[in-house]
Image (spheres, helix red, strand yellow):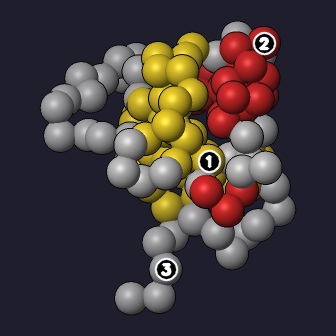
């Protein structure tokens, strides 16, 4: 294996999810693909212009507006420079914080959790090397 290409999550409203990942998290819409025969649309979201990094594939299946996330799903994690500042910015943009920034005992990382419009958890991680 060479690298992780993308993580796919199913969404109930593609525009709402693209807006969240771009406007709240600052990601870029890298590409889209619509397949009317198989009744789905894909949107690939990435960080800035880094086409070399892994992406999130948002999958909208025609006519499905909601999913049961289930108890097997964990979360997607993003590295941030300043976890406290990221939470403030996300709240100001209308994002939902479900766990404020706090020190993760034993790992020496500051983490927080937010939630996307479909209920998926997203972890923000401030690694020790990025703290001032």
Q: Which tag, 2 or 3, sits closer to the chain's start? A: 3
Alpha carbon separation for disc pair 3 and 1:
22 Å
Q: Position of residue 89 (x, y in %)?
A: 78, 23
Q: Position of residue 73 (x, y in %)?
A: 26, 40
Q: Which residue is mark 1?
A: 126
Residue picked out by circle 3: 3
Report the residue at 60% width, 55% height from top: 127
Tag shown at residue 92: 2
What is the spatial separation of the Cα atoms under label 2 and label 1, in whole angstroms? Answer: 19 Å
* Residue density around tag 2, few if under 14, some if 14–19, many if 20 or more, within 10 Å: few
Q: Residue at x 47, y 21 (%)?
A: 99
Nearer the camera: disc 3 or disc 1: 1
Q: Quadrant of the N terminus?
A: bottom left
Q: Above or below — where is 33 with respect to 15?
A: below
Look at the numbered disc 3 and give the secondary structure of its residue. Answer: loop
Q: Residue 63, image x and y in percent?
A: 40, 21
Snapshot quadrant of residue 53: bottom right
Q: Residue at x 74, y 19 (%)?
A: 88
Q: Is residue 69 visible?
A: yes
């Amino acid at each position: 294996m060479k690298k992780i290409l993308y993580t796919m999550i199913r969404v109930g409203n593609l525009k709402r999810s693209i807006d969240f990942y771009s406007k709240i998290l600052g990601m870029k819409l890298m590409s889209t693909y619509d397949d009317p025969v198989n009744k789905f649309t894909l949107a690939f979201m990435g960080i800035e212009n880094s086409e070399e990094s892994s992406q999130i594939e948002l999958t909208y299946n025609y006519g499905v507006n909601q999913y049961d996330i289930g108890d097997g799903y964990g979360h997607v994690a993003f590295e941030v420079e300043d976890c406290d500042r990221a939470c403030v910015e996300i709240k100001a943009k209308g994002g939902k914080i479900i766990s404020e920034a706090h020190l993760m005992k034993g790992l020496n990382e500051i983490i927080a959790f937010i939630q996307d419009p479909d209920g998926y958890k997203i972890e923000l991680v401030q690694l020790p090397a990025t703290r001032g």
